[in-house]
Image: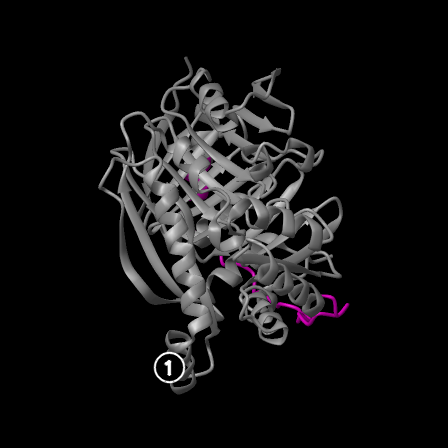
Amino acid sequence: MLRYRSAETELPGDPVQLAAQLAESGLFDQYVIYEQNGDVWFAGGALGEILVSRSEIRRRWLAEETAAPLGPHPLRQVRQQLDQLAVAGWNAYGWMAFEFSHLHAGRPDRAGEDDLLHLLVPHSEVRLGRHRARIRSADQETLDALVGLLGHADAHRTAVPRPLDVSDAEGRYPDLVAQAIEEIRTTDLQKVILSRTVDVPFPVDFVATYVHGRSHNTPARSFLLNLGGRRVAGFSPETVAEVSADGEVVTQPLAGTRAHGFGEQEDERLRAELLADPKEISEHVLSVKLAEEEMATVCRPGTVSVRDLLSVRRRGSVQHLGSSVHGLLAESATAWDVLRAVFPAVTASGIPKAPAFDCIARLEKEPRGIYSGAVLRAGSDGALDAALVLRSIFEEDGRTWLRAGAGILAGSTPARELEETCEKLRSVAPYVVPAQG
């Protein structure tokens, strides 16, 4: 059984900047940064990894890899594989693709050929608080190197972003919205989130983009990952699932949107408009109702409640209607069962979910991958925290892009939904920093 070596040190600077410094240190070929409730976690290198495709689950431990067929409960298999890793007090970090939802729906044929989940149990881990850092590493040499790196804050290079055009260059999106509206009016589908992509035509410095974008956003969670050939930086407006070690469960659906950042008077006008818009209120209430129903399947009877109903939450370039759904974990359930129940987030898929998946698969021209999936952190103590992957920039196979969507109801108008995607894209687009050289 491997046991981490540990140390603590005072922090000389901002936790986000210091986490970025660790990402650029060259010590680790893979890493995940995850900001949660005021702390920034850095996970570097891999002792072990768990990967899930539509047909199998693979576990890597040090130099060995094993594989097993995927059963009917993939996330329970993930938990079992993590528990079998020979490391005391493990934490796991990684991502879960939107197409994982097809496994839950019993349609693995729609899940594609790519991996649907990738988690790492890190070689080294740093928890960066406001004033101190707690460091764990599998070896003393790396532990000492991390303590040394955190002993001083480098002046992060000046970020010079390059403007991005977030308009619908192909002109397809309004037509897709119109098709979805017709489907909602003539079938059992009540709501669907349709998204579009914006390609980035230059190489991107993901670390600088993350730091620069974080300073201009007010996310529920933020993250930066370089894992398995994929890079993502994001400023998540909401959590899919929060499960504490003592069994408190929360999901925070946000639905209903107006722009933000135009000055106090205009922002207040848009806030009042949002709170009075029947379409936006209906969209939000439908989402909260489904979130309650999903939570009830994994929480103790009578413990599920809604707090802060229809509160306005500011997230960078937009403001949303938000609510928090709380409950207590059922004795027979785990945090992974909670993630199974609420994934993918209703606010990024639709209502009911199964016909929404079908609509998305027909109308969107490419798989979503990590977009509208989750970046997550889970622990051997039973805790789990999963951020909804929105307001993000992605890189894979030589391509870099942004992606955003809008919730479509029977009362939607294509022009307004297109503008909403632009508003959301502006949470990231102004802060994309080109790579140097």
First to last magenta residue range: 146-172
Considering every residue shown, the one lying at the far left of the view is 302
Q: Is residue 321 left or right of residue 244?
A: right
Residue 145 x %, y % = 47, 35
User: Which residue is label 1 attached to?
Assistant: 268
The image quarter in which residue 244 lies: top left
The image quarter in which residue 406 lies: bottom right
In the image, residue 64 sits, relative to residue 437, either above or below, namely above
Q: Callout 1: 10 Å neighbours few (<14), some, many (20+)?
A: few
Residue 257 part of the magenta-drawn span: no
Residue 124 x %, y % = 46, 31
Q: Amino acid at mark 1?
A: Glu
Residue 150 part of the magenta-drawn span: yes
The image quarter in which residue 144 lies: top left
Q: State the residue in front, 355 or 42.
A: 355
In this rendering, does residue 270 appear at all? yes
Q: Is residue 169 left or right of residue 272?
A: right
In the image, residue 38 sits, relative to residue 377, either above or below, namely below
